Amino acid sequence: MSDPLSQPSRAALFGLTAVALALVWFSPASAEQDKTNIVPDNWQGDALRPKPDMKNLEKIRFVTDSDYPPFHYYDEVGALTGFNVDLAKAICEVLEVQCEVNATNWSDLIPSLDKGEADAAIASIRITKEVLQEADFTSRYYATPARFVARKESELTDVRPETIEDLKIGVATGTGHEAYLKTFFPDAAVASFDTPEDAQKALKNGAIDLIFGDGISLTFWINGVTSEACCEFRGGPYIEAKFFGEGVGIAVKKGDRKLADILTYGLEQVHASGRYEELFLRYFPMSFF
C-alpha cells in the first residue's frame, strides 16, 4: 500500500507541537467559533443510527503505524500512544468490547487485515479510489484539506482567483492539487514539480510565490527544521472530495461491511459523548490559534 500522507520522519515530527493538525484545519477566524464546530470531522450531531448487531463481537484488534506523531507513536517510556490510538480505545469503550492496538509497518497495514492478523487499521489512512480497491472503510473521522502557503513577507492575504492572477504557484505534478488549481485558478501560473518537497524548496528560495498542497504535510514542513520558518498558510482550507479525497477513515478487510458499520456507529457514539472533541483538543490544542 502506498503512503497517501507521505509521513514525515519521526525525528522531524517530534520537533513539532500538538498544533500540527489544528494549524492545518482552521483559519484564524475559526478560533472564534463554538467548540462544537472546530473539529475536522463530518459528524454534525445527526440522528444516531440504531446499534448494529454485535453478536459474538467481544474484542476488536486494531493495527496502526508507530511513526507519525501526534497521531500514533511510541512515547518516552515506549508505550504506543497518539490520537489514533486513543480514538480506537474510545470506540471500544462505547462498544463495550475489549480493545487491542498494535503497531506494524505502514506497508503491512492492509495486508494484516487480509491475513486476519487484525480486524481494523486506524492509522490516518486516506480514503481514495485506489485504497478502496484493497479495503472497506468507516465514515471519515477527519478531513485532509488542501492549503496555500506563502513566504511570510508576502503581502497576499486574500487568496482568490483574481488576487493570485499571474502569480507562480508550485504544486506536485499529477496530483488532485494540480487539477484543482488548473480548474479553479486558471489564470495562475502553475509550476509543476516532481515532488511536494521540490515545490517547498522553491518557495523557500523565493523562486515561486505560493505552493498548494496537502495541509497536514505542509504543517509539518512549516513547523519543521527544513523550512527555516520561512512561510505560513494563506487562505483556505479546501476540502473538495473530488480533488482531495473523502478524508481519513478506519480500514477493515474488503467486504467486511458489518464491522465497518459497527465502527462507524462507535465513532458516532464517541462524537455524541464529547469524547472525540476532548481527544482532538488534547492532541491539537486551540491555544495555539
Image (spheres, grey):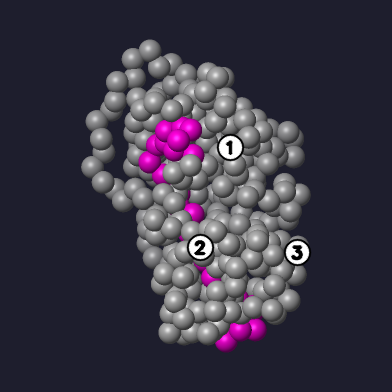
- The part of the chain drawn in magenta is 131-155
Q: Mark 2 points at which residue?
A: 177
Q: Where is residue 153 in the image (x, y as percent from the top left)?
A: 65, 84
> Given the image, on which type of amino acid does mark 1 rest?
Met
Q: Residue 1 carries which label?
A: 1
What is the CA distance from the residue labelled 3 to the residue labelled 2? 22 Å
Query: Is residue 213 visible in this depiction of the protein?
Result: yes
Of the pair 108 and 227, the residue shown nearer to us: 108
> Given the image, on which type of amino acid does mark 3 rest?
Thr
Q: Would you identify the image quadrant in which residue 78 lies? A: top right
Within 10 angstroms of label 1, few (less than 14), some, or many (20 or more) residues?
Answer: few
Query: Residue visible at 58% across and 31% down?
Result: 109
Within 10 angstroms of label 3, few (less than 14), some, or many (20 or more) residues?
Answer: some
Q: Position of residue 142 (x, y in %)?
A: 45, 49
Quadrant into which the C terminus falls:
bottom right
Of the pair 145 and 111, the residue shown nearer to us: 111
The answer to whether mark 3 and mark 2 are in CB contact below 8 A is: no
Give the answer, above or below, for where 71 lies relative to 239.
Answer: above
Q: Mark 3 points at which residue?
A: 226
Q: Which of marks 3 and 1 is nearer the N terminus?
A: 1
Query: Is residue 223 visible in this depiction of the protein?
Result: no
Q: What element carries label 3?
A: loop
Left or right relative to 125: residue 15: right
Q: What element carries label 2?
A: helix
Of the pair 177 and 82, the residue shown nearer to us: 177
What is the CA distance from the residue labelled 2 to the residue labelled 1? 21 Å
